[in-house]
Image (cartoon, grey):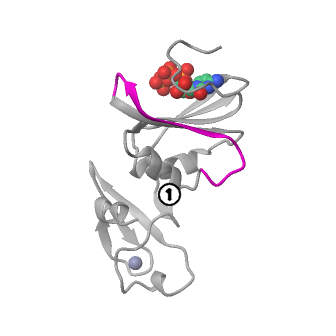
Amino acid sequence: MTKETQQVEAIKNGSVIDHIPANVGIKVLKLFKMHKTNQRVTIGLNLPSSALGAKDLIKIENVFISADQANQLALYAPNATVNQIENYEVVKKLTLSLPERINTIFKCPNSNCITHNEPVDSSFTVIAKQEDIHLKCKYCEKVFSREIVTERT
Ligand code: CTP
Ligand code: ZN
């Protein structure tokens, strides 16, 4: 089953997040708490990729990532592919689209925002005009550029 091109050992069942930009893999892993599982997680960093030059890759055994969950990754890795593996075969390949909302992952950059003092989860509406992505906080209603929100978390 192992292909000559397989750079990280194939898995029997689970999810493979492929085509993550190099240097973003660790961030994605931690932000989405993918390492906080009892399942085996294997990662590949700076793997050669014809499309990206270099890429990161995360394999999580026995965990199946839903389309909604996969889309939460789109702010960091819009071109990532989430593959579902069953009995060593790729049975589903999800490409990501920006979600309408993003909850819990990011902190609101507004230090006066109520989310910093109350036990509530953050929640942003995603506003996308072509390449230009902004996030609007549900609580303070301020709008921030994608970079401001993601770099602070
Ligand atoms: N993979 C795996 N275990 C398997 C099957 C596939 O870890 N049993 C991984 C492959 O290594 C690859 C990803 O799942 O990183 C997708 O597999 P596949 O669709 O076969 O690879 P490509 O055709 O290269 O995918 P793409 O077209 O998305 O680049
Ligand atoms: Zn806010």
Q: Position of residue 61 (x, y in %)?
A: 68, 38
In the image, is residue 128 above or below residue 12? below
Magenta span has 36? yes
Q: Amino acid at mark 1?
A: Leu
Tell me what residue is drawn at x 33 percent, y 61 percent: 151
Q: Is residue 116 magenta?
A: no
Secondary structure under tag 1 reads: helix
Foreground pick, 41 / 13: 41
x then y, percent, for residue 128: 32, 55
Q: Residue at x 51, y 55 (%)?
A: 30
| Image x and y of residue 88, in percent | 68, 22
Q: Is 107 on the left or on the right of 68, as rendered?
A: left
Mark 1 residue's CB less than 8 Å from ligand 2 = no
The vertical placement of 42 against 110, above or below, is above
Q: Which residue is found at the position 37% from the left and 78% from the top? A: 141
Query: Looking at this view, is 98 or 31 the one in front?
Result: 31
**x%, y% of residue 136?**
37, 69
- Residue on which disc 1 sits: 31
Rendered view: 78 above or below 125: above
Region rendered in magenta = 35-51
Q: In which quarter of the view is residue 67 placed?
A: top right
Identify the image quadrant of the C terminus.
Answer: bottom left
**How many neighbours does mark 1 have within 10 angstroms: few (below 14), some (14-19), or many (20 or more)?**
some
Would residue 2 be found to the left or right of residue 62 on screen?
Answer: left
Quarter of the image that includes the N terminus: top right
Quadrant for ligand 1? top right
Q: Is residue 61 left or right of residue 7?
A: right
